[in-house]
Amino acid sequence: MDDMDRIAENLRWIDWGDIDDVELNCREALNELAAEPRIVRARLEELPNRPELLDLCEHYDILDKIVLASEDDPGVRVRLHVFLPGYFDRPHNHRWSYASKILRGHYRHYLFGNAELDEQVEPNKLPVLHVREEPVGTSYALHHSMVHAVAAEPFTVSLVIRGPAVKDRFLVMDRQTNEAWWQYGAKDESEAEAKKKQMSRTRFAEVTGWMGEWGLF
């Protein structure tokens, strides 16, 4: 077992229903990964030969997700997120609780609270209750019920630890069009949808090349 697998194994025992426990334990893991870049570098180097991880990596127009470790039982993942130019979130909650640490860049973080949500919600009436600037070195934990949105500086990079899914869907809201809709997890996607977002080996090499140029790992 290497250091990355050791860290991921320890995350299995977190009480993911207790966000204080999530923050304390994930902060310890995130700080170790940030302080020991060799751990992430070693995993990035071997990842092309780990199809069970590479197949989980995703590319979108404004975001790349690289899965560094995955514990299927109970469903914990360690990921790198690279926010691309033009990145912004529509307000949404999550299917899981998670913790994050900013390694490069920064983002503006909007928190809307734990709203009782359904498709009939009026997004443009959803009030922003808390605004944070998330600079390099910041870490935080977010409960799956929290509605939030992010506006990221181009090429911001974060380490993310996501916990096990506790629901099948999450709600996304567009404050410009005042529409809201449900999105579902990978198990409910079509093969075409899954294929469309899967990161290619070429893209993986490009993104990891940037990280080398930035001196992250």
Image (cartoon, rainbow, N blue to C red):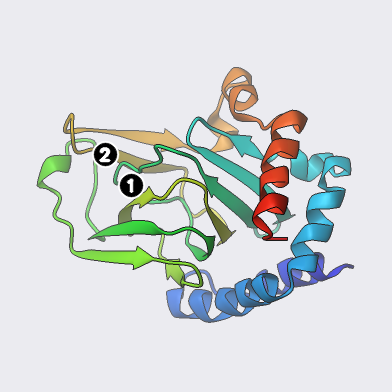
Of pointers 2 and 1, the one earlier in the residue sequence: 1
Q: Residue at x 43, y 59 (%)?
A: 106
**CB under 8 Å between callouts 2 and 1?**
yes
- In which quadrant is the N terminus drawn? bottom right
Q: Residue furthest front?
A: 213
Across and down, in percent, residue 201 comes to 77, 32
Query: Is 34 placed left or right of 4 in the picture?
Result: left
Front position in the image: 190 or 80: 80
| Residue 162 seen anywhere in this rendered image of the structure | no
Packing grade of label 2 (10 A; few <14, some 14-19, many >=20) is many
Q: Secondary structure at mark 1?
A: loop
- In the picture of the structure, the residue carrying the numbered disc 1 is 92
Front position in the image: 181 or 45: 45
Front position in the image: 152 or 23: 152
Across and down, in percent, residue 86 comes to 39, 37
Q: Quadrant of residue 38?
A: bottom right
**Location of residue 61 with respect to 185 vertically, above or below:** above
In the rendered picture of this protein, how many numbered marks are placed on residues?
A: 2
Q: Residue at x 74, y 73 (%)?
A: 36
Say which mark, if any, is on residue 173: 2
**Location of residue 192 with respect to 136 vertically, above or below:** above
Q: Secondary structure at mark 2?
A: strand
| Residue 111 seen anywhere in this rendered image of the structure | yes
Q: Quadrant of residue 29?
A: bottom right
Across and down, in percent, residue 18 comes to 46, 75
Q: Quadrant of residue 187?
A: top right
Q: CA distance from mark 2 to mark 1?
A: 6 Å
